[in-house]
Image: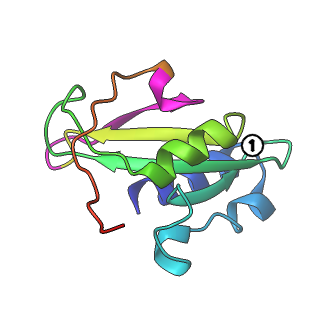
């Protein structure tokens, strides 16, 4: 919700109220399988697909990403954004990164799905 509100504010400050009205928390309305949480927009109307990762701890706290999130970041690097919200309980701040996640982070496989066949 923090990033949804920020994105609406950002677009309103740019005089783009019609785009601000279209910002949606898609993880809540459409489910968590899209590879991102928030649908927002660039000033030119192009979609910004934002995955939000939040922690109460510092900005370098490790976090988990799903295979859907990795795949979407690779498939749509021009639209994908990662918003890393940190110090959320005390004084929320965030940074934003674009493009495939492996450009910015060391990705360590932490879980595996086991199935028969």
Relative depth, front residue between 51 and 68: 68
On the question of residue 25 being in view, the answer is: no
- Does residue 65 appear left or right of residue 46 in this picture? left
Relative depth, front residue between 85 and 7: 85
Magenta span contains residue 9? no
Instruction: Tell me what residue is drawn at x 79 percent, y 42 percent.
Output: 43
Residue reaching furthest to the right: 44
Q: Quadrant of the N terminus?
A: bottom left
Whole-percent x, y for residue 65 in the image: 36, 46
Residue reaching furthest to the front: 117
Magenta span contains residue 100? yes
Q: Quadrant of residue 57?
A: top left
Is disc 1 surrounded by few (<14), some (14 to 19) or many (20+) residues within 10 Å? some
Dot 1: element: loop
Q: Is residue 13 above or below residue 59?
A: below
Relative depth, front residue between 114 and 108: 114
Whole-percent x, y for residue 100 in the image: 56, 30
Q: Which residues are magenta?
A: 89-102
Q: Quadrant of residue 21?
A: bottom right
Q: Is residue 60 above or below residue 34?
A: above
Residue beneath disc 1: 42
Q: Is residue 62 above or below residue 16?
A: above
């Amino acid at each position: 919700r923090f990033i949804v509100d920020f994105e609406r504010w950002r677009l309103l400050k740019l005089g783009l109220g019609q785009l601000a009205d279209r910002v949606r928390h898609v993880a809540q309305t459409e489910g968590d399988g899209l590879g991102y949480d928030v649908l927002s927009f660039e000033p030119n109307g192009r979609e910004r697909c934002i995955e939000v990762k939040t922690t109460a701890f510092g900005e370098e706290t490790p976090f988990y990403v799903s295979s859907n999130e990795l795949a979407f970041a690779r498939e749509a690097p021009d639209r994908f954004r990662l918003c890393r919200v940190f110090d959320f309980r005390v004084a929320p701040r965030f940074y934003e990164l674009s493009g495939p996640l492996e450009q910015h982070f060391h990705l360590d496989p932490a879980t595996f799905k086991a199935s028969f066949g």
